[in-house]
Image (spheres, helix red, strand yellow):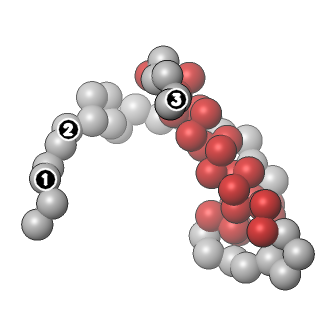
C-alpha cells in the first residue's frame, strides 16, 4: 500500500469554472480533435488549488 498523508482543510470547497467540454473531459470523455481540452481543465483545477493554498509550482 502507498503512504497515507493528510491534506489540511481537505474538506474545504473551491470553485472552478469549466466549460461543458472540459467537465466531460475530466469525466473521461474523449474528443477527436480536442486533446488540449482535458489539459486545459486540469490546469484550471490545479491553478484553483494553488491559489487556495498559495502553492508555488515547480
Q: Which mark is residue 3?
A: 1
Whole-angstrom CA distance, mark 1 to mark 2, is: 10 Å
Q: Secondary structure at mark 1?
A: loop
**Above or below, comparing residue 46 to residue 56 in the picture:** below
Whole-angstrom CA distance, mark 1 to mark 3, is: 22 Å
Q: Which residue is mark 2?
A: 6
Is there CB contact under 8 Å for labels 1 and 2? no
- Residue at the outermost front position: 58
The spot of residue 30 in percent (x, y) is 73, 79
Q: Secondary structure at mark 3?
A: loop
- Viewer-proximal residue, 55 or 20? 55
The spot of residue 7 in percent (x, y) is 27, 35
Estimate how packed mark 1 is, as few (under 14), some (14 to 19) or many (20 or more) residues with alpha carbons within 10 Å.
Answer: few
Identify the residue shown where x is 18% and y is 43%: 5
Q: Which residue is mark 3?
A: 57
Badge 1 or badge 3: first in the primary sequence: 1
The spot of residue 24 in percent (x, y) is 71, 68
Q: Nearer the viewer, mark 3 or mark 2?
A: 3
Badge 3 or badge 2: first in the primary sequence: 2
The spot of residue 13 in percent (x, y) is 47, 35
- Judged left or right of residue 19, residue 28 is left
Instruction: Examine the rendering and report whether any part of residue 18 can be seen.
Output: yes
**Above or below, comparing residue 19 to residue 49 in the picture:** below
- Residue at the outermost right position: 33
Instruction: Examine the rendering and report whether any part of residue 52 can be seen.
Output: no
Estimate how packed mark 2 is, as few (under 14), some (14 to 19) or many (20 or more) residues with alpha carbons within 10 Å.
Answer: few
Identify the residue shown where x is 15% and y is 60%: 2
Amino acid at each position: 500500500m502507498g503512504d497515507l498523508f493528510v491534506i489540511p482543510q481537505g474538506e474545504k470547497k473551491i470553485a472552478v469554472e469549466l466549460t461543458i467540454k472540459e467537465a466531460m473531459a475530466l469525466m473521461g470523455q474523449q474528443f477527436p480533435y480536442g486533446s488540449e481540452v482535458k489539459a486545459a481543465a486540469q490546469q484550471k483545477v490545479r491553478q484553483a488549488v494553488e491559489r487556495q493554498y498559495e502553492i508555488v509550482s515547480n
